[in-house]
Image (cartoon, rainbow, N blue to C red):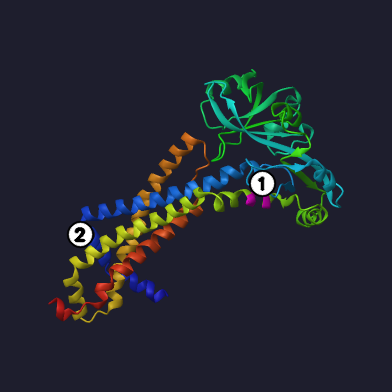
Amino acid sequence: MIGFISRLQQRTSLGWLQLSHQKGRLMVALAGIAFADVLIFMQLGFQSALYDSNTRLHRTLDTDIVLISPQARNVVNLATIPRRRMLQAENVAGVQSADPLYSAFANWKNPQTRKETAILVVGFNPNQVPFAIPEVQQNRDVMKLPDRVLFDRASRGDYTQSLAQLDQGQVVTTELERRTIYLTGTFKLGASFATDGTLMTSDQNFLRLFPRRKAESLSAALIRVEPGQNPDQVADAIEAYLPKDVKVLTKQEFVQFEENYWRVNTAIGFIFTLGTAMGFVVGVVIVYQVLSTDVNAHMAEYATFKAMGYRNGYLLGVVFEEALILALLGFLPGIGASLGLYHLTRTATNLPLYMTIARAAQVILLNVIMCSVSGMIATRKLRSADPADIF
């Protein structure tokens, strides 16, 4: 291995010399590769934001086990389960407590613009706040007052004036489901692909806002296990004890349940995957055109090398060297442009679109594979070339 690296260092970089000989064509090639990288980065970023934004509420839950309906599709469409199932679950060994969770998707009036928009409303027992969100924990007593709710300050939309009033300790009044509500505090969660934001309140206020909803019809039941107990084992015991009209999930399984909905049961997850594949194919085509043109332009030189005794492996190495150089150089403007687009999209949509080291490594690996595949295709003619035919 050391000997190979030493020979590689001593070797003349024909690949770089050929690419840099025509700088205009090199710049066009790098722009094409950067464009393909931006496509891949954006699709992977949107896909990650899709899963992260729609599971943020799940990941903030301060619970071990969640009971939901088998008919539940996602957090916006949880269906309902009987309250008695929650009470029955408390009888299972290892269960410390069980609390109700109510949720509903509703239209409300933006208190600043007075325009209606969709928002998720969540109700729970304020004496046992089930979310590990400091602002919600601190405002548990405020939520007990009639029609008082907490507002997600990271919601999508124009709420600058309303947030300024709330930060000054003022109460903001608006309407939800034709009922006047009072915003008395904020927390930070964020918008998602399913909803523009979230309101949190007590279970009693939730039932006032949605009078058709019965107290015994829960969206979910949140189970905490006793210290030292294994949540997986307790979940299995609850599942064996309860009828099959409830689904028993650990917290991690609840997160995975939401993620699977968007990955498998909606078109949007497939579209982002398809977009990533299309970006890869675009990159292969662009690099192939560059390398194929370069091979054809220097066929006489390659034939001379063959006549001098150089084997196909050496000549193919030159082409693959060009492919690797294109992959690495094209990646730099691609990730730079993607960082700017990530920031622009995050600012405009409040979606969690961030660059990660893992994603950058994934794209640069795809870049190398993309350029290598293009090099393999472009060298077919070179492998079969006969010096006698060329001269």
Disc number placed over residue 21 in the picture, else none: 2
Relative height, residue 214 to residue 1 (above, below): above
Relative height, residue 188 to residue 249 (above, below): above
Disc number placed over residue 72 in the picture, else none: 1
Q: Quadrant of residue 378?
A: bottom left
Query: What residue sits 19% from the left and 68% below the top?
Result: 298
Q: Is residue 255 magenta?
A: yes
Residue type at mark 2 is His
* Most foreground residue, 214 or 159: 214
- Left or right, residue 255 beside residue 116: right
Name the image quarter holding the N terminus.
Answer: bottom left
Tell me the mark number nearer the camera, choosing from 2 and 1.
Answer: 1
Name the image quarter holding the C terminus.
Answer: bottom left
Q: Quadrant of residue 345?
A: top left
- Left or right, residue 79 beside residue 2: right
- Left or right, residue 129 beside residue 383: right
Residue 309 is situated, as x and y percent measured from the top left of the image, at 22, 82
Label 2 crowd (10 A; few <14 / some 14-19 / many >=20): few
- Left or right, residue 16 beside residue 346: left
Secondary structure predominantly adopted by residues drawn in magenta: helix
Relative height, residue 202 to residue 305 (above, below): above
Disc number placed over residue 207 in the picture, else none: none
Residue 272 is situated, as x and y percent measured from the top left of the image, at 47, 50
Alpha carbon of mark 2 to alpha carbon of mark 1: how far? Answer: 61 Å
Residue stretch rendered in magenta on the structure:
253-257
Query: What residue sits 33% from the left and 54% below the top?
Result: 33
Residue type at mark 1 is Ala
The mark that comes first in sequence, 2 or 1, is: 2
